[in-house]
Amino acid sequence: MRKLAITFVGALFIFFACCKDAKKGEESKNVEATSKATEMFSLVQDSTKVSFTAYKTTDKVPVGGKFQKINFTKTNSGTTAMKALNGTEFSIPVSSLFTNDPTGTRDPKLLEFFFGVLKDTELISGVFKVDGDKSSIDVTLNGETQNIPLAYEMNGNDKITFLGTMDLANWNAMDAIASINKACEVLHTGKDGVSKTWSEIAVKAEVLLAKK
């Protein structure tokens, strides 16, 4: 009888020990799930790259460039990279323009004969927008605000490349186009003898986000 009692007590001990371990395991899973659920993304500001491609001559010869500085005036966080970017506000000093021209003459011409002709010439500003699986930016230039739809490609969960097309006619910037075309008339003349500067600009942005 005593042996049976000891065996019963031992069985109860094992049962409660197993239940305790199972509860700990469940609590551990719950903590892990909560941790994953509250994982947030935020923009790594100094990693953002903004570049563009303009075009000259009737053959549409590309001329690349970039802005070496971008300031963020409002940033957010979110449970996904795209949600974190929604509502992000930025401004780009046009003085940070860089086209890697070996002659050193292109950038000063662009600043004087293109940006210098526009209103509010110091900054290009914008707001990033997300609507479901669609993204775009509202860009303010020459006193006008217009939207640019963006295609995007994700590299993992934290790096995104955005591509879009900006037609400067939508920002009433054709006078600036005519101005830079006149200043670069010879350089923008193709084999057909026609000097042309296109109003379409391909824009590209690369952003990196961090998880916390």
Image (tube, rainbow, N blue to C red):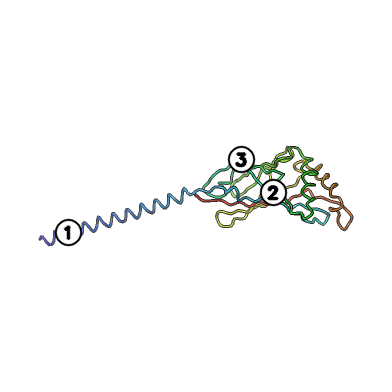
- The reply to whether dot 3 and dot 2 touch (C-beta < 8 Å) is no
Q: Is residue 62 above or below residue 148?
A: below
Between disc 1 and disc 2, the foreground one is: 2
Q: Residue at x 89, y 55 (%)?
A: 193
Q: Residue furthest right?
A: 193
Residue that label 2 marks: 67
Residue 110 x %, y %: 78, 46
Whole-angstrom CA distance, mark 1 to mark 2, is: 78 Å
SS state under label 2:
strand
* Along the viewing direction, whichever of 72 and 31 lies nearer the viewer: 72
Nearest to N terminus: mark 1 or mark 2? 1
Other-residue count near label 3 (Cα within 10 Å), few / some / many at <14 / 14–19 / ≥20: few
Residue that label 1 marks: 8
Residue 79 x %, y %: 51, 48
Horizontal side, residue 139 vs residue 38: left or right: right
Between disc 1 and disc 3, the foreground one is: 3
Please tell me the numbered disc located at residue 85. Answer: none
Q: Residue at x 68, y 44 (%)?
A: 92
Q: Residue at x 60, y 53 (%)?
A: 160
* Along the viewing direction, whichever of 43 and 7 lies nearer the viewer: 43
Nearest to N terminus: mark 3 or mark 2? 2
Residue that label 3 marks: 73
SS state under label 3:
strand
- The reply to whether dot 1 and dot 2 touch (C-beta < 8 Å) is no
Q: Residue at x 66, y 47 (%)?
A: 69
Residue 113 x %, y %: 81, 44
Nearest to N terminus: mark 1 or mark 3? 1
Given the image, on which type of amino acid does mark 2 rest? Phe
